[in-house]
Amino acid sequence: NCVFKNNNCDGTGAAVDVLEGSSVEIDNCLFVSNIANTGMDRISQQYGLTYNAEHGSGALTVFPGSVATVKSCTFTGNWNGVDDKGGKNIYRGCIFWQNNAGDGSRPGRPYEIDILDASGVTNCWLNGDIQDLRGTLSADMNHLEAHDPQFDETFVPRAAEYSGAGYR
C-alpha cells in the first residue's frame, strides 16, 4: 500500500532495488514518475560500473539471485517499469502503462518490463513504447496492447476491464 513517486536515482532502481540475495513482496503499490540511471555515464567513468547501458533500469530493479513477488501494482509514467534479472519471480494483476518518461541519458527506448523468466507473469496489463523488452511474456496469460485504463487522479483504473488489477 505504498506510493513511489518522483524518485530519481543516479544508478539503478529509481524506486526499489532488490539486491542480489534479497527478497521482497510488493502488494498494492503505485510506481509513478520514477527515473533511474540519471548518472550512469558519470558512474561508468568514475567507477567503471555499467548496468543496462542501452535501455536503463526500471522503477523496480530486481538483481540476479533475488526474489520478487509483485501483486496488484501499477507502474506508469516511469523511465521503464520493471527490470527483473532474478528467476521465477511473480507478477500478478499488475498494470504497466506508458512507462516512457526519460531524461535522454539512455540510447534505447523505454520499456514496460524486461524479465528473463516470465513464467510467473500472469494477468498483467501492458502498453507502452516497448511492452516486453525480451519477448518472454505469454500473450495467453497477459493483456498485451492493453486499452487505456482511464486512471483517476489517484491512478486507480476506471476502465471496467481492469476490475481487480493494479493499485487501489
Image: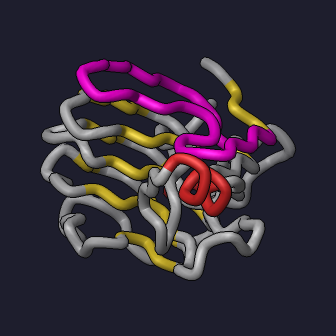
Indicate the quadrant containing the N terminus: top left, top right, bottom left or bottom right: top right
What residue lies at 52% left-to-right and 54% top-to-bottom? 81
**Secondary structure of the magenta portion, mostly?**
loop
What residue lies at 53% left-to-right and 26% top-to-bottom? 28
What residue lies at 52% left-to-right and 51% top-to-bottom? 58
What residue lies at 18% left-to-right and 44% top-to-bottom? 120
Residue 126 visible to the viewer = no
Q: In the image, is 156 to the left or to the right of 66? A: right
Residue 96: x %, y % from top left:
52, 56
Depth check: 82 or 3 in front? Answer: 82
- Indicate whether 145 appears above or below 35: below
Depth check: 59 or 153 in front? Answer: 59
Residue 91: x %, y % from top left:
32, 41
The answer to which image quadrant residue 68 occupies is top left
The answer to which image quadrant residue 141 occupies is bottom left
Depth check: 25 or 124 in front? Answer: 25
Residue 112: x %, y % from top left:
48, 63
- Tell whether position 91 is magenta: no
Residue 43: x %, y % from top left:
60, 51
Q: In the image, is 39 to the left or to the right of 59? A: right
In this rendering, the count of numbered labels is 0
- Indicate whether 44 appears above or below 74: below
What residue span does the magenta drawing correspond to? 6-31
- Tell whether position 8 is magenta: yes
